[in-house]
Each structure stands twice: as C-alpha cells, then as structure tokens.
Amino acid sequence: MAVNETEREAMSRALALAALGPRGVNPQVGAVILSPDGTILAEGWHHGAGTPHAEVDALSKLAPGAARGATAVVTLEPCNHTGRTGPCALALIEAGVSRVVYALDDPGAVSGGGAERLRAAGVSVEAGEQADAAHAVIEGWLTAQRLGRPHVTVKWAQSLDGRAAADDGSSQWITGPAARADVHRRRAASDAIVVGTGTVLADDPSLTARDGDALLPDQPVPVVIGSRPTPADAAVRRHPHTPLFFDGHDLHAVLADLHGRGIQSVFVEGGPTLASAFVAAGLADRVLAYIAPVLLGGSRLALTDIGVSSIGEAHRLTIDEWLPLGADLLAIAHPASLPTASTEGAV
C-alpha cells in the first residue's frame, strides 16, 4: 500500500518535530499518530537520552485504546530493543496501531529490526518516505553508528583559481557577507568546530557562531589540534564552551575522543594544512567549498598535499548542491564512495 498525501504531510510534520529534540548520543526523531481518517491524534519527539522515544511520547498523549487502528508516521524505524526505555515497535503493537510509515532504517545491530517485528505482528509497514530529509536531520548520529566517529564537514573558502589567500597571507575577505553568514549558520548546526594551532596563531579566531556581532543560541565546542601552545589570551579561550586542545596529529584519535564525549558532527575550518589532512585521511564526509569570483594566483592553495600523485588516485566527489550566495558560489559535495571504519590517516 503506497504512502498517501496525508501520510506525506504527516512525515513533513514529524521531521519538524524531530528537529526540536537535542543533538546527542540518541537520534533526533519525530512521530505523528494519525486516525484511520487521517486526522492527527497526537505528536511526539525524543527529548533526550533516558526520555521516552518519539513514538512513545506521542502515544502517551492518548487515552488507552485511542490508537487502535491508527497509523504511526515516524522519521526513524521504531526500535526493537530494551535500553533505558522499552522497544518502540512493541509499544506500537500493544497500542493497536495498524500501520507504520517511517523514513530511515535503524542501522543499529541491537536497536534495528523493528519493522520485521511490526510485520510479524500483522502491522502494515512502509519504509523510505522522505528518507533524504530524515537523513539530513540525523546525519551525525548515522555516521557515529556506522563508523564510530563524528560526521566530518571540511570547509574552505577559495578564489576562482583555487587560492585560500594572497601571497602575503591576507585572506579577509575572499568571500562576501552572504557566504560568511552561511558559514556561521553551519557552525551553529555543528557540535564542534575544529582548527589547527597554525590558524589560532595566525588569525586568533573566536570560533563562535554569530549573526553579525551577536552570538547565535547554539555554539559549537571549539577544538584546537596541534603541538604548538595556544596563547593564554587567545580569543578561543573566551568561547562560551571550554576549548578542547589536542597536542598531537592523530586525527582518528581526536575523532574517537570527540565521539566519546557525545560529539556527533564536527566542522573543520582550520586552513589548508588541516583541511588537506582530513581529506587525505579519508575523513571528509562532506566538503563545503565557498568559491569567490576573484583571481589571486600565487602559491597559497586552498588544499595542499592530499596524497594524490596520479589522476587514478583522485578523491572523487558527488556534488549535492550548487548554492549561490551573493556573488559567491558554494559547492556542497560528498565522497563518491563512502568511507569505511578501517580508513587510516594522520596529519
């Protein structure tokens, strides 16, 4: 039975609800319960670790028996395990739900399998509705589940001829206000922002997410990688979050540490050396290249050595979007082949 328009609209609502939940060790999930005639009976979302999952949150707002024959529209496959809360698949079955529409399969070896349990109980199940939109909401969590590390976005700004700065080192500003505002919005959507000590010493960045001079409500945790000391009066030390310093160059170890702290998405903004190291190590899950219509020439490339010596070794990307930002253009891309947990590399 195909997904109908009412269910599609309910999924859009569930995705909006999912975004209300906190980013953390658990995924952001939203749920909408529909009556047999398509009326919304209840809504819910996951409010954080240890709280009821989205489906149970929605069901809790209904009287006993009110969900019998209803349809549950959920952004992630109902879980099939008992942790701090019980299996959502079982809760839906016991509530008498007759149909479940969800966007993404749960990749967890333990938590997955909810769809099979529902079908075995006679519940109609449809998967894949608005999967791309749901993926965008919990991309960091999905990467953490698959690879055991945060999702990594590597960003740089460049001239049309691929330079990150003029030969004298000046780089403010290659791109215009619209591009810089977009960067700050993306910083705010990330759990952590990562730079190298070279960037800290050269630019003294605050690593905050701002709207003009005002701090945005969500701030990424600042992370500095490198062996050179950060000055006591560096702007990063005045960040709303306590900075994390890593005296070393093992990117895998850094990401493992951040993963252990519950950080699921990092925004790498540390200049050509650090950006190139993440790309070379196969750790760039997304690339953001802000391209300005200016020519600089010279030797200060946006990327340096990424381990490519022949065209056959090129890092192939798939373009997700070309986004105009004022006079500039943002290329959003991801690796043509997915990284694996065995990828190795270091700065």
Image (tube, rainbow, N blue to C red):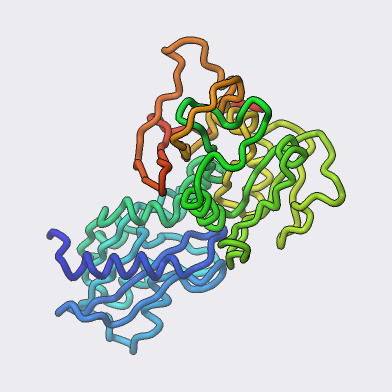
| Residue name at image x 28 percent, y 86 percent | 65
Question: In the picture shown, does residue 17 fall above or below 198?
Answer: below
The answer to whether residue 332 shows anywhere in this view is: no
Q: Quadrant of the N terminus?
A: bottom left
Provide residue 303's location: percent of width, then percent of height. Answer: 56, 26
Question: In the picture shown, does residue 118 fall above or below 295?
Answer: below
Q: Residue furthest left?
A: 1
Between 138 and 278, the one lying in front of the other is 278
Q: How many marks?
A: 0
Q: Is residue 116 left or right of residue 311?
A: left
| Residue name at image x 54 percent, y 22 percent | 297
Provide residue 337's location: percent of width, then percent of height. Answer: 40, 29
Q: Quadrant of the C terminus?
A: top right
Question: In the picture shown, does residue 180 fall above or below 284?
Answer: below
Between 15 and 105, the one lying in front of the other is 15
| Residue name at image x 68 percent, y 28 percent | 168
Q: Is residue 347 left or right of residue 226?
A: left
The answer to which quarter of the image holds residue 76 is bottom left
Q: Residue furthest bottom?
A: 63
Provide residue 290's location: percent of width, then percent of height. Answer: 47, 40
The answer to whether residue 274 shows anywhere in this view is: yes
| Residue name at image x 74 percent, y 49 percent | 244
The answer to which quarter of the image holds residue 72 is bottom left
Between 234 and 338, the one lying in front of the other is 234
Question: In the picture shown, does residue 260 fall above or below 337?
Answer: below
Q: Is residue 38 left or right of residue 283?
A: left
